[in-house]
Amino acid sequence: MSKRRVLGITAIRSEYFLQRSILQAIVDHPELELGLVVTGAHLSPLHNYTVKEIEADGFPIVARIENLIYSDRDAARLKGAASQLQILTHLVDELRPDWLFVPADREESMTLALCGTYLNIATAHYAAGDRVVGNADDMIRHAVSRLSHLLLTTHEQARERLIKAGEQSWRIHNVGHAGIDRIRSAPQLTSAELAKALGVHEIQDHYAVVVQHPLTSEIGDAGRQMRETMAAARALKLQLFVSYPNSDPGSNQIIEVIEEHRATPGVHVFRNIPDREFVNLLRGATVLLGNSSLGLLEAPYLKLPVVNVGRRQSERHHASNAFFVAADREAIVRQVRAIIDDEETRRKISTCENPFGDGHTGEQVAKLLASTSIDSTLLNKDLSY
């Protein structure tokens, strides 16, 4: 019996770490064979060539597509997607895999899903049905679901949202969030081991991890918002571990603010933090500051306090460990101090329930890709009304 060939795609560290356990489960499954397209920020020196991590993990890379345009203009991302689609179309046409595996809500999700639609190839969309109001990613995610044949959600509310949107319920499976897989399985490091791996003198008892991205509807304000976050973090007098943002328009403004603090004592700046070290940082952090999706989707598993700054993620499903504040330094400081000192706030965090699965998402997805019938019923989509 021949193996089903699955073609995946990855373009940036956050999305790669989100789907890595799924990719590994596909490799490990006796009835599946993985091929991976690497593109976008993975191939960029600005983001420290994170393709090296994919190579180290041993995944079979079938193509590398350089499409990232260095610009803070909103048109840059679309132009990059256009060049990506042109090369990707030729590749998918040549390979004709059994499945296309599409992650989340970025431009590579759209380009690969378009290939599936026009070339009549079964397409599975992971992290379908989530909601991120105010960002282009939100509309991309829902459009990709319309173009896909198998919809894999990270929580029950997302599954229900897709059904309300008219998707046929038999196509939708709640498999949980694969980011929890990596947290569950990442090896534990001591404080000394973590400090050595990160190249810092010590890991203090109290520290904050800062990860903040631009919002496409507020590109011009990205620098000011990051300046408010960094001012608040400094005022709290916590040791800081600050990671570069993603490659979306507005990211250069955020990087400029981060670099202003590189030489500041107690502030540690990283273009990219390797996954093992990053998970261990999260395990011991006092708070996660910024607006990364990991604060809503993965942090509940760790009962990690999260202060989400600004409108990014503001309408997304979350647990009681997450607190939403304006991009204002005083509001951020007040919320972090409540997390540290207020008994009721700490109770909410310690009792938060994780709605995003048990850390075995990869195996569930691989099983579905191996067992789902690829026939006219799957490929000929219809709405339920």
Image (tube, rainbow, N blue to C red):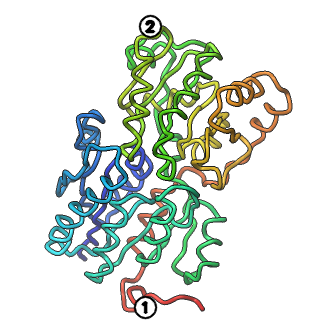
For the point 51% across and 55% down, the residue is 135
Residue in the foreground of this view, choosing between 364 and 278 = 278
Q: Where 281 sits versus 2, above or below?
A: above
Residue 124 spot, x, y in % from top left? 41, 71
Type of amino acid under label 1 = Thr
373 to the left or right of 297: left
- What is the quadrant of the C terminus in the image? bottom right
Check disc 1 and report its element: helix, strand or loop: helix
Residue 18 spot, x, y in % from top left? 44, 49
Q: Nearer the viewer, mark 1 or mark 2?
A: 2
Check disc 2 and report its element: helix, strand or loop: loop
Q: Which residue is mark 2?
A: 201
Residue 281 spot, x, y in % from top left? 51, 27
Type of amino acid under label 2 = His
Mark 1 or mark 2, earlier in chain = 2
The mark found on residue 377 in the picture is: 1
For the point 30% across and 36% down, the residue is 47
Q: Where 185 sits versus 108, above or below?
A: above
212 to the left or right of 36: right
Q: Badge 1 local density, few (<14 within 10 Å), some, or many (20+)?
A: few
Total marks drawn? 2
Residue in the foreground of this view, choosing between 259 and 193 = 259
For the point 31% across and 51% down, the residue is 11
315 to the left or right of 2: right
